Amino acid sequence: MVVALTDLEPTRARTGLASALTLAGMCLLVWGVTEEAQVGLLGRHLTTLVSLAVASAAWVAWEVSRHFRPPAATTAVELVAIGIAGGTLASLAPLGLVYVGVAALAATLTWRLSVAMWVAVLSLAALGLALELAGKDLTLLGSGVAAVVAGLAIGTSRIESARALDRAARVRVAEAEAEAERARAELLAGRNHMARELHDVLAHTLSALSLRLEALDTVMSASGSSAELREQLAVTKQLVHAGLQDARGAVHALREDVPPLDRQLEKLATESGATLRVAGLPRQLGPDISLALHRAAQEGLTNVVKHAPGASTLIELDFNDRTVALSVTNGPPTGPPSPISGTGGGYGLQGIKERLLLVGGRAEAGPIGDGWRLVAEAPA
């Protein structure tokens, strides 16, 4: 609001100054005409007086009314009056040609050029007729044409300048809107990225950690064996350590310092008891692609822990000429239902799809036989 008010005040000041200058110029013009051709109540002096009064009054009326969007007919009467009265006045006082030029200028600012030409033609016709009736040389008509052309040219130039300013303002508004949209998109992308990272880094490790804590609770309640207790605690510490490693891996990914994907998956398969098969010639992938596929593998293994405990799991990594494909396939569950099977909001797979889409890949998941398969593919 402060900016709008700040921009508005100079505009009002310029409008007031322009009106004051116009009025001052008109007063000088009236004084010059009266000095050039005497006014009076008889003969051509009366004609001069009437023409000057009509042209000046019509000019003032147009200056005032154009700020209030008057009817088109009112504007037409005002401008035609300025032109005809100015043309008549010019036959008696050449300074009257200024009114002819003003009529052409005002018509150009009001209508398109083809319509404004009619006002110019009427003004010149009035000048020519007045010269003919006064028995004067028509050479002044050439000066009238020059005044009309000048008025049309100035009016056209002002219109083009206004259009250029309008286009520039529209461009600035469009750029501001685009910048705001980019900032909004970056904000949303950042929020989605953080949401995916929180889910991918924590869900995999904490799901397994929850299972181990459940087992620890069972051991403590049932057997009370200190050896088994230490074993469960050792496994739990390993899982916590793995979670910390995952967090460090996310940082390395941001720094483009990630190990080869096949080595990452080998470690992941060892920790989860899955089988890894690699086809094609392994090669270093971009950090975003490597991280996206690693997170897809983690999501697949997390879902096995949740929904198919004890199931055999196969991780396949296939390096093709232009793409790299990853799949996590599990068989039917062989163990008791997992206590965390009902946890999560179902955002894991959606996050994986979004992540792969950002790097130009795709991901999908669905049943296969008695088990389930998650497939992810990305350019490489």
Image (cartoon, grey):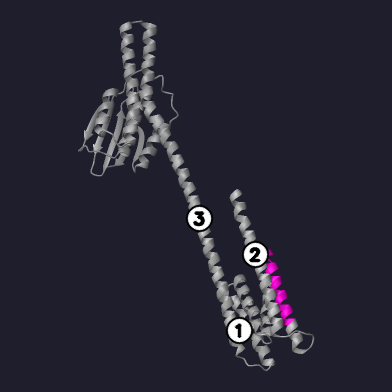
Disc 3 secondary structure class: helix
Q: Is residue 117 above or below residue 253?
A: below
**Labelled disc at residue 144:** 1
Question: Which secondary structure class fits the magenta region best?
Answer: helix
Nearest the viewer among 347 and 15 is: 15
Mark 2 highlights which residue?
17
Alpha carbon separation for disc pair 1 and 3? 42 Å
Helix, strand or loop under label 2: helix
Q: Nearer the viewer, residue 18 or 75?
A: 18
Horizontally, is 372 left or right of 85 in the view?
left
Report the residue marked by disc 3.
Answer: 172
Give the answer, above or below, for where 277 lies relative to 88. above
Q: Please tell me in which quadrant of the rendered image residue 258 appears.
A: top left
Amino acid type at circle 2 is: Leu
The x, y position of residue 243, in whole percent, is 35, 24
**Mark 2 or mark 1, earlier in chain:** 2
CB of mark 2 within 8 Å of CB of mark 1? no
Label 1 Cα crowd, 10 Å radius (few <14 / some 14-19 / many 20+): many
- Depth order, front residue of 17/377: 17
- Which residues are drawn in magenta? 50-71
Q: Is residue 53 magenta?
A: yes
Q: Amino acid at mark 1?
A: Gly
Where's residue 190, x and y in %? 43, 38
Among the two numbered marks 2 and 3 on one chain, the one whose residue lies closer to the N terminus: 2
The residue nearer to you, when weighing 37 against 283, is 37
Q: Which tag is nearer the camera, tag 2 or tag 3?
A: 2
